[in-house]
Amino acid sequence: MKKGEVSWQSFREGKFRHDCVSIELTKNDATSVTYRGTGEVWQDEFGTLSFKCISRDDTQRAVESILTSAALAPGKLIPEEAYYSIQLTTFDNATWHAENVWVEMRCSFVTGYTVIVGKLRTLRSARAANLTSRSNSMELLILNQNHKDWNSLTDTVAHLEQLGCDIKFLMQRDSDVLVEITGNAPLPKNFEVRIVEALRYVLASILHLSLIVKNTDGVREVTLISPVRQSDTRLVPPLATLKPSPDVAVLFERYLSYVHEGASADFVHPCSMYLRNACEASANSVEASAIGLCVAVEGLANLLPYDAGKESNDQTIAVVQKELLKRLAEIGVTPNVKSRVEGLLGQLKSIRAADRLQLLVKAGKLDQSCFSAWKKLRNTGVHPTKTKLEELDDSQLLEFLDRIYQVYVCMYQITFALIGYEGTFSNYALSRFPAATYPLPAAPGGITT
Protein backbone atom coordinates (compact mmCIF):
# COMPACT_ATOMS: atom_id res chain seq x y z
CA MET A 1 0.00 0.00 0.00
CA LYS A 2 1.25 3.41 -0.86
CA LYS A 3 1.59 5.86 1.97
CA GLY A 4 0.36 8.61 -0.32
CA GLU A 5 -3.12 7.13 -0.53
CA VAL A 6 -4.90 9.43 1.89
CA SER A 7 -8.26 7.65 1.79
CA TRP A 8 -7.21 4.32 3.25
CA GLN A 9 -4.74 5.94 5.62
CA SER A 10 -7.43 8.16 7.13
CA PHE A 11 -9.83 5.21 7.25
CA ARG A 12 -7.24 3.18 9.10
CA GLU A 13 -6.98 5.93 11.70
CA GLY A 14 -10.75 6.22 12.03
CA LYS A 15 -10.67 9.74 10.56
CA PHE A 16 -12.17 9.17 7.11
CA ARG A 17 -14.33 12.24 6.33
CA HIS A 18 -15.11 13.93 3.03
CA ASP A 19 -17.51 16.61 1.87
CA CYS A 20 -19.31 15.49 -1.27
CA VAL A 21 -20.05 17.72 -4.20
CA SER A 22 -22.63 15.16 -5.35
CA ILE A 23 -24.45 12.20 -3.83
CA GLU A 24 -26.80 10.17 -6.01
CA LEU A 25 -29.16 7.55 -4.58
CA THR A 26 -30.91 5.08 -6.84
CA LYS A 27 -33.49 2.70 -5.46
CA ASN A 28 -32.87 -0.90 -6.45
CA ASP A 29 -36.13 -1.11 -8.37
CA ALA A 30 -35.63 2.23 -10.17
CA THR A 31 -34.17 2.85 -13.62
CA SER A 32 -32.88 6.37 -12.92
CA VAL A 33 -31.48 8.40 -10.02
CA THR A 34 -34.06 8.73 -7.25
CA TYR A 35 -32.40 11.43 -5.12
CA ARG A 36 -29.50 13.77 -5.81
CA GLY A 37 -27.82 16.39 -3.64
CA THR A 38 -24.74 17.45 -1.71
CA GLY A 39 -23.59 16.04 1.61
CA GLU A 40 -20.75 14.24 3.37
CA VAL A 41 -19.38 10.80 4.18
CA TRP A 42 -17.48 9.99 7.38
CA GLN A 43 -16.60 7.43 10.03
CA ASP A 44 -18.54 7.61 13.26
CA GLU A 45 -17.07 7.02 16.73
CA PHE A 46 -17.18 3.26 16.18
CA GLY A 47 -15.44 3.45 12.80
CA THR A 48 -18.65 2.75 10.85
CA LEU A 49 -18.96 4.50 7.50
CA SER A 50 -21.92 6.89 7.42
CA PHE A 51 -23.31 9.42 4.97
CA LYS A 52 -25.75 12.32 4.78
CA CYS A 53 -27.33 13.74 1.62
CA ILE A 54 -29.33 16.96 1.43
CA SER A 55 -31.58 16.74 -1.59
CA ARG A 56 -33.90 19.43 -2.91
CA ASP A 57 -36.49 17.30 -4.58
CA ASP A 58 -40.17 16.48 -4.64
CA THR A 59 -41.00 16.06 -0.95
CA GLN A 60 -44.06 14.05 -1.91
CA ARG A 61 -41.80 11.32 -3.24
CA ALA A 62 -39.84 11.31 0.04
CA VAL A 63 -43.06 11.00 2.02
CA GLU A 64 -44.11 8.05 -0.12
CA SER A 65 -40.73 6.39 0.49
CA ILE A 66 -41.07 6.92 4.25
CA LEU A 67 -44.58 5.45 4.27
CA THR A 68 -43.46 2.50 2.14
CA SER A 69 -40.63 1.72 4.56
CA ALA A 70 -42.95 2.04 7.55
CA ALA A 71 -45.38 -0.41 5.94
CA LEU A 72 -42.84 -3.26 5.67
CA ALA A 73 -44.07 -6.39 7.41
CA PRO A 74 -42.49 -6.95 10.85
CA GLY A 75 -40.63 -10.21 11.29
CA LYS A 76 -39.88 -10.50 7.57
CA LEU A 77 -36.71 -9.86 5.59
CA ILE A 78 -36.49 -6.43 4.01
CA PRO A 79 -37.04 -6.91 0.25
CA GLU A 80 -34.09 -6.15 -2.01
CA GLU A 81 -36.02 -3.44 -3.86
CA ALA A 82 -36.29 -1.40 -0.64
CA TYR A 83 -32.52 -0.73 -0.59
CA TYR A 84 -30.51 1.87 -2.50
CA SER A 85 -27.24 2.04 -4.42
CA ILE A 86 -25.20 5.19 -3.86
CA GLN A 87 -22.59 7.10 -5.81
CA LEU A 88 -20.61 9.77 -3.96
CA THR A 89 -18.28 12.27 -5.60
CA THR A 90 -15.93 14.06 -3.21
CA PHE A 91 -14.37 17.49 -3.70
CA ASP A 92 -11.06 15.88 -4.65
CA ASN A 93 -12.91 14.33 -7.64
CA ALA A 94 -12.86 10.78 -6.26
CA THR A 95 -15.93 8.63 -6.96
CA TRP A 96 -17.14 6.04 -4.44
CA HIS A 97 -19.90 3.47 -4.69
CA ALA A 98 -21.98 1.53 -2.17
CA GLU A 99 -24.64 -1.11 -2.79
CA ASN A 100 -27.74 -2.29 -0.92
CA VAL A 101 -27.87 0.60 1.57
CA TRP A 102 -30.77 1.08 3.97
CA VAL A 103 -31.60 4.77 4.35
CA GLU A 104 -33.64 6.96 6.66
CA MET A 105 -35.30 10.20 5.52
CA ARG A 106 -36.50 13.44 7.00
CA CYS A 107 -38.31 15.92 4.78
CA SER A 108 -39.61 19.46 5.20
CA PHE A 109 -42.57 20.83 3.26
CA VAL A 110 -41.49 24.34 4.25
CA THR A 111 -37.97 24.27 2.81
CA GLY A 112 -38.55 21.56 0.21
CA TYR A 113 -35.41 19.70 1.30
CA THR A 114 -35.07 16.01 2.13
CA VAL A 115 -32.25 14.85 4.42
CA ILE A 116 -31.20 11.25 3.76
CA VAL A 117 -28.84 9.42 6.13
CA GLY A 118 -27.55 5.85 6.44
CA LYS A 119 -24.74 3.45 7.32
CA LEU A 120 -22.48 1.92 4.69
CA ARG A 121 -21.24 -1.65 5.00
CA THR A 122 -18.66 -1.08 2.26
CA LEU A 123 -17.45 1.82 0.13
CA ARG A 124 -15.65 1.12 -3.13
CA SER A 125 -13.62 3.24 -5.56
CA ALA A 126 -11.81 2.27 -8.76
CA ARG A 127 -9.36 4.25 -10.87
CA ALA A 128 -6.75 3.69 -13.54
CA ALA A 129 -3.21 3.30 -12.26
CA ASN A 130 0.28 2.46 -13.47
CA LEU A 131 0.67 -1.11 -12.25
CA THR A 132 3.28 -2.50 -14.61
CA SER A 133 5.35 -4.09 -11.83
CA ARG A 134 2.41 -5.61 -9.91
CA SER A 135 -0.40 -5.80 -12.43
CA ASN A 136 -2.16 -8.65 -10.61
CA SER A 137 -2.05 -8.23 -6.86
CA MET A 138 -4.20 -7.76 -3.80
CA GLU A 139 -3.65 -6.23 -0.38
CA LEU A 140 -5.82 -7.04 2.63
CA LEU A 141 -5.72 -5.09 5.88
CA ILE A 142 -6.96 -6.58 9.17
CA LEU A 143 -7.06 -4.10 12.05
CA ASN A 144 -6.73 -4.47 15.82
CA GLN A 145 -5.10 -7.88 15.99
CA ASN A 146 -3.18 -9.48 18.85
CA HIS A 147 0.45 -9.67 17.78
CA LYS A 148 0.95 -13.01 19.58
CA ASP A 149 -1.81 -14.69 17.58
CA TRP A 150 0.08 -13.98 14.35
CA ASN A 151 3.60 -14.94 15.44
CA SER A 152 3.42 -18.19 13.52
CA LEU A 153 2.67 -16.39 10.24
CA THR A 154 4.31 -12.96 10.50
CA ASP A 155 6.91 -12.37 7.76
CA THR A 156 6.28 -15.78 6.22
CA VAL A 157 5.45 -16.31 2.54
CA ALA A 158 3.02 -18.96 1.34
CA HIS A 159 3.60 -20.21 -2.21
CA LEU A 160 0.55 -21.56 -4.05
CA GLU A 161 1.87 -23.02 -7.26
CA GLN A 162 -1.52 -24.30 -8.45
CA LEU A 163 -2.96 -20.77 -8.17
CA GLY A 164 0.21 -19.03 -9.37
CA CYS A 165 0.46 -16.62 -6.45
CA ASP A 166 2.48 -15.81 -3.33
CA ILE A 167 0.97 -14.63 -0.04
CA LYS A 168 2.96 -12.67 2.53
CA PHE A 169 1.91 -11.65 6.06
CA LEU A 170 3.22 -8.42 7.60
CA MET A 171 2.55 -6.97 11.05
CA GLN A 172 2.20 -3.17 11.10
CA ARG A 173 1.84 -0.79 14.04
CA ASP A 174 1.91 -3.83 16.39
CA SER A 175 -1.81 -4.46 15.81
CA ASP A 176 -2.55 -4.34 12.07
CA VAL A 177 -1.94 -7.24 9.70
CA LEU A 178 -1.28 -6.62 6.02
CA VAL A 179 -1.68 -9.59 3.69
CA GLU A 180 0.01 -9.11 0.31
CA ILE A 181 -0.99 -11.40 -2.58
CA THR A 182 0.88 -11.26 -5.87
CA GLY A 183 0.04 -13.39 -8.89
CA ASN A 184 1.17 -14.13 -12.39
CA ALA A 185 -2.40 -13.93 -13.68
CA PRO A 186 -5.64 -12.27 -12.54
CA LEU A 187 -6.60 -13.62 -9.13
CA PRO A 188 -9.80 -15.70 -8.83
CA LYS A 189 -13.11 -14.01 -8.12
CA ASN A 190 -13.70 -13.30 -4.42
CA PHE A 191 -10.27 -14.73 -3.60
CA GLU A 192 -10.16 -12.56 -0.49
CA VAL A 193 -13.01 -14.65 0.94
CA ARG A 194 -10.92 -17.81 0.59
CA ILE A 195 -7.94 -16.07 2.23
CA VAL A 196 -10.11 -15.14 5.23
CA GLU A 197 -11.47 -18.70 5.46
CA ALA A 198 -7.96 -20.15 5.59
CA LEU A 199 -6.77 -17.59 8.16
CA ARG A 200 -9.76 -18.29 10.39
CA TYR A 201 -8.88 -21.96 10.20
CA VAL A 202 -5.22 -21.75 11.20
CA LEU A 203 -5.81 -19.01 13.80
CA ALA A 204 -9.11 -20.42 15.16
CA SER A 205 -10.60 -16.94 15.36
CA ILE A 206 -13.33 -14.85 13.73
CA LEU A 207 -11.54 -12.06 11.90
CA HIS A 208 -12.86 -9.53 9.41
CA LEU A 209 -11.23 -7.47 6.68
CA SER A 210 -11.15 -3.68 6.99
CA LEU A 211 -9.62 -2.84 3.62
CA ILE A 212 -9.21 -4.54 0.25
CA VAL A 213 -7.01 -3.18 -2.53
CA LYS A 214 -7.12 -5.02 -5.87
CA ASN A 215 -4.79 -4.27 -8.78
CA THR A 216 -5.97 -5.90 -12.00
CA ASP A 217 -5.17 -5.00 -15.60
CA GLY A 218 -4.25 -1.39 -14.87
CA VAL A 219 -7.18 -0.72 -12.52
CA ARG A 220 -6.74 -0.12 -8.80
CA GLU A 221 -9.87 -0.82 -6.75
CA VAL A 222 -10.06 0.19 -3.08
CA THR A 223 -12.80 -1.14 -0.80
CA LEU A 224 -13.30 0.25 2.71
CA ILE A 225 -15.28 -1.99 5.08
CA SER A 226 -17.05 -0.88 8.24
CA PRO A 227 -16.08 -2.84 11.39
CA VAL A 228 -18.20 -5.79 12.50
CA ARG A 229 -18.93 -6.69 16.10
CA GLN A 230 -16.82 -9.70 17.05
CA SER A 231 -17.40 -12.35 19.68
CA ASP A 232 -14.80 -13.14 22.33
CA THR A 233 -14.16 -16.69 21.14
CA ARG A 234 -12.04 -19.36 22.84
CA LEU A 235 -11.49 -21.97 20.14
CA VAL A 236 -7.96 -23.43 20.04
CA PRO A 237 -6.04 -23.56 16.73
CA PRO A 238 -5.03 -26.82 15.01
CA LEU A 239 -1.36 -26.02 15.64
CA ALA A 240 -0.58 -23.66 18.50
CA THR A 241 2.86 -22.07 18.33
CA LEU A 242 4.34 -18.76 19.39
CA LYS A 243 7.09 -18.97 16.79
CA PRO A 244 7.04 -19.08 12.98
CA SER A 245 6.39 -22.66 11.93
CA PRO A 246 6.54 -24.04 8.41
CA ASP A 247 3.68 -26.41 9.25
CA VAL A 248 1.33 -23.48 10.01
CA ALA A 249 2.06 -22.13 6.53
CA VAL A 250 1.48 -25.60 5.07
CA LEU A 251 -1.85 -25.83 6.91
CA PHE A 252 -2.82 -22.45 5.50
CA GLU A 253 -1.83 -23.46 1.96
CA ARG A 254 -3.60 -26.82 2.11
CA TYR A 255 -6.81 -25.36 3.50
CA LEU A 256 -6.81 -22.46 1.04
CA SER A 257 -6.41 -24.86 -1.88
CA TYR A 258 -9.17 -27.11 -0.52
CA VAL A 259 -11.81 -24.38 -0.13
CA HIS A 260 -10.82 -22.71 -3.40
CA GLU A 261 -11.27 -25.90 -5.40
CA GLY A 262 -14.37 -27.17 -3.62
CA ALA A 263 -16.85 -24.28 -3.60
CA SER A 264 -18.40 -21.76 -5.92
CA ALA A 265 -16.73 -18.35 -5.89
CA ASP A 266 -19.99 -16.83 -4.64
CA PHE A 267 -20.32 -19.00 -1.54
CA VAL A 268 -18.44 -19.84 1.65
CA HIS A 269 -17.19 -23.43 1.77
CA PRO A 270 -19.29 -25.75 4.00
CA CYS A 271 -16.16 -26.76 5.91
CA SER A 272 -15.52 -23.12 6.80
CA MET A 273 -19.15 -22.70 7.85
CA TYR A 274 -18.99 -25.61 10.31
CA LEU A 275 -15.68 -24.40 11.75
CA ARG A 276 -17.06 -20.89 12.18
CA ASN A 277 -20.10 -22.26 14.00
CA ALA A 278 -17.80 -24.08 16.42
CA CYS A 279 -15.73 -20.94 16.90
CA GLU A 280 -18.76 -18.72 17.53
CA ALA A 281 -20.18 -21.28 19.99
CA SER A 282 -16.94 -21.12 22.00
CA ALA A 283 -17.83 -17.54 23.01
CA ASN A 284 -20.76 -18.84 25.08
CA SER A 285 -21.05 -21.07 28.13
CA VAL A 286 -18.95 -24.22 28.22
CA GLU A 287 -22.11 -26.31 27.76
CA ALA A 288 -23.18 -24.34 24.68
CA SER A 289 -19.62 -24.48 23.38
CA ALA A 290 -19.59 -28.28 23.70
CA ILE A 291 -22.87 -28.66 21.79
CA GLY A 292 -21.72 -26.32 19.03
CA LEU A 293 -18.44 -28.21 18.76
CA CYS A 294 -20.14 -31.60 18.49
CA VAL A 295 -22.61 -30.39 15.87
CA ALA A 296 -19.72 -28.94 13.84
CA VAL A 297 -17.90 -32.30 13.97
CA GLU A 298 -21.00 -34.03 12.62
CA GLY A 299 -21.22 -31.53 9.77
CA LEU A 300 -17.53 -31.99 8.93
CA ALA A 301 -17.90 -35.76 9.03
CA ASN A 302 -20.62 -35.58 6.38
CA LEU A 303 -18.10 -33.95 4.03
CA LEU A 304 -15.98 -37.09 4.12
CA PRO A 305 -16.31 -39.51 1.19
CA TYR A 306 -17.83 -42.86 2.09
CA ASP A 307 -17.25 -46.15 0.31
CA ALA A 308 -18.76 -49.12 2.09
CA GLY A 309 -17.02 -51.52 -0.29
CA LYS A 310 -17.66 -55.18 0.52
CA GLU A 311 -19.55 -54.16 3.66
CA SER A 312 -22.45 -52.71 1.65
CA ASN A 313 -25.79 -54.03 2.94
CA ASP A 314 -28.13 -52.38 0.44
CA GLN A 315 -29.73 -55.65 -0.66
CA THR A 316 -30.14 -56.89 2.89
CA ILE A 317 -31.67 -53.57 3.97
CA ALA A 318 -34.13 -53.69 1.07
CA VAL A 319 -35.26 -57.18 2.11
CA VAL A 320 -35.62 -56.14 5.76
CA GLN A 321 -37.69 -53.09 4.82
CA LYS A 322 -39.97 -55.14 2.55
CA GLU A 323 -40.57 -57.86 5.13
CA LEU A 324 -41.19 -55.46 7.99
CA LEU A 325 -43.64 -53.36 5.98
CA LYS A 326 -45.43 -56.55 4.99
CA ARG A 327 -45.64 -57.58 8.63
CA LEU A 328 -47.00 -54.17 9.62
CA ALA A 329 -49.82 -54.59 7.12
CA GLU A 330 -50.61 -58.04 8.55
CA ILE A 331 -50.92 -56.94 12.17
CA GLY A 332 -52.86 -53.79 11.25
CA VAL A 333 -50.96 -51.09 13.16
CA THR A 334 -52.34 -47.57 13.44
CA PRO A 335 -51.33 -45.05 10.73
CA ASN A 336 -49.30 -43.09 13.31
CA VAL A 337 -47.22 -46.13 14.32
CA LYS A 338 -46.82 -47.19 10.69
CA SER A 339 -45.52 -43.73 9.77
CA ARG A 340 -42.98 -43.78 12.60
CA VAL A 341 -41.75 -47.27 11.68
CA GLU A 342 -41.40 -46.30 8.02
CA GLY A 343 -39.33 -43.29 9.11
CA LEU A 344 -37.02 -45.51 11.14
CA LEU A 345 -36.66 -47.98 8.28
CA GLY A 346 -35.76 -45.13 5.94
CA GLN A 347 -32.78 -44.29 8.15
CA LEU A 348 -31.25 -47.70 7.44
CA LYS A 349 -30.09 -46.45 4.05
CA SER A 350 -28.63 -43.19 5.35
CA ILE A 351 -24.92 -42.99 6.10
CA ARG A 352 -24.36 -41.75 9.63
CA ALA A 353 -21.56 -39.41 10.58
CA ALA A 354 -20.30 -42.13 12.91
CA ASP A 355 -20.06 -44.55 9.96
CA ARG A 356 -17.85 -42.12 8.04
CA LEU A 357 -15.68 -41.41 11.07
CA GLN A 358 -15.24 -45.11 11.80
CA LEU A 359 -13.65 -45.55 8.37
CA LEU A 360 -11.29 -42.68 9.23
CA VAL A 361 -10.32 -44.46 12.46
CA LYS A 362 -9.55 -47.67 10.54
CA ALA A 363 -7.37 -45.70 8.11
CA GLY A 364 -5.25 -44.30 10.95
CA LYS A 365 -6.46 -40.75 10.37
CA LEU A 366 -8.62 -40.31 13.46
CA ASP A 367 -7.79 -41.11 17.06
CA GLN A 368 -10.21 -43.74 18.39
CA SER A 369 -10.34 -42.19 21.86
CA CYS A 370 -11.20 -38.77 20.41
CA PHE A 371 -13.89 -40.32 18.24
CA SER A 372 -15.38 -42.01 21.32
CA ALA A 373 -15.20 -38.73 23.26
CA TRP A 374 -17.23 -37.03 20.52
CA LYS A 375 -19.99 -39.66 20.71
CA LYS A 376 -20.19 -39.38 24.50
CA LEU A 377 -20.10 -35.57 24.55
CA ARG A 378 -22.68 -35.28 21.79
CA ASN A 379 -25.10 -37.76 23.32
CA THR A 380 -25.02 -36.20 26.78
CA GLY A 381 -25.13 -32.64 25.46
CA VAL A 382 -27.79 -32.92 22.77
CA HIS A 383 -29.86 -35.66 24.44
CA PRO A 384 -29.53 -35.16 28.23
CA THR A 385 -31.26 -37.82 30.30
CA LYS A 386 -31.31 -35.87 33.55
CA THR A 387 -30.37 -32.45 34.88
CA LYS A 388 -29.08 -31.15 38.18
CA LEU A 389 -29.53 -27.79 39.79
CA GLU A 390 -26.14 -27.95 41.47
CA GLU A 391 -22.88 -27.40 39.62
CA LEU A 392 -20.47 -30.19 38.66
CA ASP A 393 -17.85 -31.06 41.21
CA ASP A 394 -14.17 -30.62 40.31
CA SER A 395 -13.63 -34.17 39.05
CA GLN A 396 -16.75 -34.07 36.86
CA LEU A 397 -15.85 -30.66 35.48
CA LEU A 398 -12.32 -31.82 34.65
CA GLU A 399 -13.68 -34.90 32.87
CA PHE A 400 -16.05 -32.68 30.91
CA LEU A 401 -13.27 -30.29 29.86
CA ASP A 402 -10.94 -33.17 28.95
CA ARG A 403 -13.63 -34.55 26.69
CA ILE A 404 -14.04 -31.17 24.97
CA TYR A 405 -10.31 -31.03 24.25
CA GLN A 406 -10.45 -34.55 22.83
CA VAL A 407 -13.23 -33.43 20.49
CA TYR A 408 -11.04 -30.50 19.38
CA VAL A 409 -8.54 -33.10 18.18
CA CYS A 410 -11.34 -35.08 16.53
CA MET A 411 -12.52 -31.98 14.67
CA TYR A 412 -9.09 -31.01 13.41
CA GLN A 413 -8.10 -34.53 12.39
CA ILE A 414 -11.22 -34.64 10.21
CA THR A 415 -10.12 -31.40 8.53
CA PHE A 416 -6.60 -32.79 8.06
CA ALA A 417 -8.10 -35.75 6.19
CA LEU A 418 -10.27 -33.44 4.08
CA ILE A 419 -7.47 -31.09 3.02
CA GLY A 420 -4.77 -33.75 2.69
CA TYR A 421 -2.50 -32.34 5.40
CA GLU A 422 0.47 -34.23 6.81
CA GLY A 423 2.60 -32.70 9.54
CA THR A 424 2.53 -31.62 13.17
CA PHE A 425 -0.53 -30.61 15.18
CA SER A 426 -1.32 -29.77 18.79
CA ASN A 427 -2.63 -32.86 20.56
CA TYR A 428 -5.12 -31.39 23.01
CA ALA A 429 -6.14 -34.90 24.05
CA LEU A 430 -2.91 -35.29 26.04
CA SER A 431 -1.58 -33.44 29.07
CA ARG A 432 0.25 -30.17 28.28
CA PHE A 433 -0.95 -30.34 24.66
CA PRO A 434 2.24 -31.71 23.05
CA ALA A 435 2.95 -31.56 19.34
CA ALA A 436 2.08 -34.77 17.51
CA THR A 437 2.33 -36.00 13.93
CA TYR A 438 -0.46 -36.62 11.46
CA PRO A 439 -1.36 -39.17 10.09
CA LEU A 440 -1.24 -41.20 13.28
CA PRO A 441 1.64 -43.64 13.75
CA ALA A 442 0.83 -47.34 13.46
CA ALA A 443 0.97 -49.35 16.67
CA PRO A 444 2.49 -52.86 16.89
CA GLY A 445 0.32 -55.39 15.09
CA GLY A 446 -0.76 -52.89 12.46
CA ILE A 447 -3.38 -51.17 14.63
CA THR A 448 -3.24 -47.40 14.63
CA THR A 449 -3.38 -45.38 17.83
Image (spheres, rainbow, N blue to C red):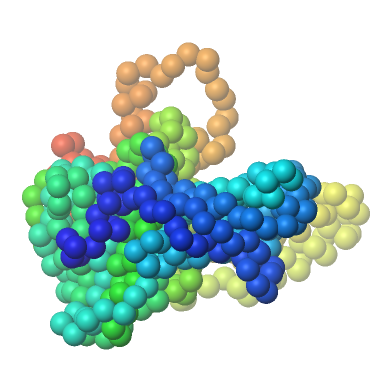
Which corner quadrant of the image does residue 274 belong to? Answer: bottom left
Q: Is the residue 162 above or below the residue 191 in the image? A: below
Q: Nearer the viewer, residue 300 or 146?
A: 146
Q: Is the residue 361 above or below the residue 373 in the image? A: below
**Residue 166, can we see it?**
yes
Residue found farthest to the top: 390
**Residue 415, can we see it?**
no
Residue at 28% across, 58% down: 8
Residue 219 shown left or right of residue 319 in the figure: left
Which corner quadrant of the image does residue 217 belong to? Answer: bottom left
The N terminus appears in which quarter of the rendering?
Answer: bottom left
| Residue 421 place in picture, x, y as percent | 24, 66
Q: Nearer the viewer, residue 68 or 330?
A: 68
The C terminus appears in which quarter of the rendering?
Answer: bottom left
Residue at 19% across, 45% down: 175
Residue at 43% across, 30% down: 285
| Residue 271 place in picture, x, y as percent | 42, 61
| Residue 334 place in picture, x, y as percent | 89, 50
Q: How many numbered markers are drawn?
A: 0
| Residue 263 place in picture, x, y as percent | 44, 72
Residue at 37% across, 67% down: 94
Q: Nearer the viewer, residue 178 or 396?
A: 178
Residue 37 shown left or right of residue 75 in the figure: left
